[in-house]
Amino acid sequence: MASAVAVALLLAPAAFANFITPKAGGSPNANKIDSLYKIILYIAAVVFMIVVGTLVYSMFKFRAKKGAVAAQIHGNTRLEVSWTVAAALILVAITVVTFVKLGGIINPPNSNPGVVLSASTTQPTPPNGKQVTICVQGRQYIWRYTYGSGCLNNYFTNKLPYSYQEMEAPAGATVVLDIQSTDVIHSWWVPSLGGKVDAVPGYTTYTWFKALHPGLFHGQCAQLCGRNHAAMTALVNVVPPAQYQAWLNQQQRLITQANDRVGALRQYLTQSGQL
Amino acid sequence: MAVTAPPVRPVRPVPQVITDTVVKPRQTKRWVEWVTTTDHKKIGIMYLVLTFVFFLLGGIEALLMRVQLSVPNSTFLTGERYNELLTMHGTTMIFLFVVPIMAGFGNYFVPLMIGARDMAFPRLNAMSFWLLLFGGIVFYCTLFFNPPEAGWWSYPPLSSIQFSPSGGQDAWIFLIHLTGISSLLGAVNFYATIANMRAPGMSWGRLPLFVWAILVYAILLIIAIPVVAAAVTMMLTDRHFGTHFFDPTAHGAPVLWQHLFWFFGHPEVYIMILPGFGMISEVIPVFSRKPIFGYKAIAAATVVIAFLATLVWAHHMFASPLPIVVMGFFMLSSFLIGVPTGVKIFNWISTLWRGSLMMTTSLYFAIGFIAIFTIGGITGIFLATFPVDWQLTDTYFVVAHFHYVLMGGAVFSIMAGLYYWFPKITGRMLNEPLGKLSFWVMFIGFNMTFFVQHALGLSGMPRRIYTYGPGLGWSTYNLISTIGSFILGVGILLTIINVARSLRVGKIAGPDPWKGNTLEWFTPSPPPPNNFDVIPRVRSVEPMRDIRRQVERETGVTQKTGGSERFARV
């Protein structure tokens, strides 16, 4: 078994991705979480081998035999102190690694040169302060995205483009998400683009991603939000920046057209006395 | 040993209580005796039976959920039914099974192990049991109306009157109150008993480790239960009397509930596992024929775990709105708790080391427990590292982790305790081959069910979803997990069959079938109502061993036991 686990660990990055390591590859924060996870995994594997190896060995070696007498040992202070210290040292090591890696996980980097599309001052902020802001609003049982800075202040009157369930995002740009909920607690999670952030009504939470390449990323609400929680999926469609800009314009146009049609209908209904 | 006519003395294999059967005319019907009893042993048996029934109910709920998840887009259950089952499974297993079954073992064995004739407050003890029963009835009556749907953690606003209008949520609140009062009364009782009623000579340094564990269990309950009692009362007033503690639309704070709930909820985890640690600490030295390695370290680790257990609650909330510095604190405190837990594991293995292991079913479960709990402990380190937890929390990785700790940890230790103490409780042995079969089936089924759930979580499957689409890479793992869960169920069923069979035809155990270390083996099996006619003076952590040696010295005859020799390969 020991060799099987060792082989599994060696193959971890390739064949066993998503079996013993978290999803990654979409965004630097997800990748850094993944590498932190792997460091802990290697340490854990060694500890596990030692503990279970000793356990299994003693199970066979010290089985009651004729004439065997159990050694009447009550303890060994030096041994006990040393494994207490050893356990503590391992944890100190993991702590140090965690804090070394933490900066890259919580602080967004700058966008790639030339792909900055809009700027805002909402936290978290990349060093040059330029970012794409998308507001994520959880509600039973769908995610709503509003695009552009200032989206937090007013969802409707700013006439910002919005979409449901599927988010469009530009590749190479640092995207900051402002996350809110209108009803119960939801949790924003697209595994390849980083960790979870709860959407708690009454609070605004933040996360970010910087998609390394175009692609479609699957995610799902991760906090029980009611009977149809399983249906509250999310898709992030990462496209080249020019395409993103074109999509925004198109979405803006479609929304305006739809609003105009609704306005005209409302006017007609009001004038004809039906409303 | 050469038997050369020792000085003639009457040979008494094990010190026997002479008046173990008192014949008295039966005045009351048997069921009236059970309902009105204040005998800690009868109450203990009622606790064990009742909680095991709840264990089976919770297990059936789990199997129904596993059936639903076995294939993608299954229509076996609706989202509503699934959420109800999920809530009932969690609530049952925690409030109606693991916590009270530890109280059951504690009730039966704490007085026996410390050489007392009953608990300090026998009638209060009966009240604890009946409150638990009523709590369970209140909760399970919702099956006929609307079971709660907001999960055992019941986060508002989902559990508020607006989103969970049914009375099921109120029944859940009522259950928390009833079982909470039951646990509190039990805890006060345990504390008073252990502090005041120990046999002469049993100093704190000679307290059996199971009793240490129950003592700390009691203290943790006294710390944690009032907090959840307050929190669910606030939820109740939010729901019905117009307060807004947790209502974000009126400046209430849903995150406040999370803090209060997990301030209770994390000590609760140790409330569930520490008595299991205690049982393992009793079982391993007896079947290794060795003293426990590092008694003081294990007792101290129990106390340190309890202290740290009150400082780690927010590691359940790393995805909630919390400042990074707070997450850092809770990561470190959660790491710290790994140290005393590791110490215990090392001490158990060292107790096995150079022992003379009698491979009984009880020891099988104890060793299986160590292996499984080690995995659960190690995955705990991943979850405590908060940036990693952002990927893992609320996924099947967490489900796997806490089932390794609670199902593989607490339930395997309960099984070890059951096989160890059944002869004392009933006077009959459980069947060993059947027990070992049950162990292997459970062990395989357990790992099959829960090991792949780590992979499910890592490949992006969140918890608590009632169905999922094909093509996400989750289908195979889910099917394996479901098959495993049924194997696990068969394993548990084998032990139930074993118990049912042994109650009628099991071999007679005698007072001390295992050559035990602690005082419960000094009494006949089952013990008489008063436990001890004479309470022996305690001179070490292993009083029964001292007694056995003394008898051997005085009679020159090696002490036979009630039949455990045939399990040893001698």
Image (tube, coloured by chain):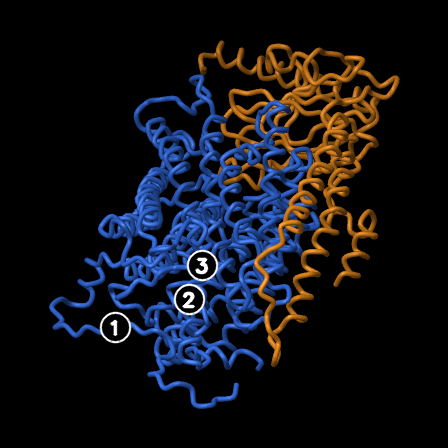
Front disc: 3 or 1: 3
Q: What colour is chain B?
A: blue
Q: Which disc, if any, is residue B20?
A: 1
Decide which of B132, B307 is in the foreground and name it.
Answer: B307
Q: Which of marks 2 and 3 is in front?
A: 3
The three-letter amino acid code for the residue at tag 2 is: Met
Colour of chain A in the image: orange
Cα distance in 3D space between marks 2 and 3: 9 Å
Q: Quadrant of residue B242?
A: top left
**Residue sitting nearer the eye, B371 or A151:** B371
Query: Mark 2 or mark 1, which is nearer to you?
Result: 2
Structural crowding at the residue carrying mark 2, measured as other residues with C-alpha within 10 Å and reported as few (<14), some (14–19) or many (≥20): many
> Is residue B160 depicted above or below B365 in this figure?
above
The answer to whether B296 appears left or right of A33 in the picture is left
Give whichever of A259, B70 is nearer the camera: B70
Can see residue B72? yes
Q: What residue type is labelled 1?
A: Asp
Tell me the residue at 81%/27% (across/down).
A171
Same chain, labels 3 and 1: yes
Question: Could you tell me residue A166's position as x and y percent?
Answer: 68, 31
What x and y, as percent, mark residue A118? 77, 13
Query: Disc 2 versus disc 1: distance between alpha carbons?
Result: 19 Å
Where does residue A27 sit, x and y in percent of width and height?
78, 31
Mark 3 or 1 closer to N-term? 1
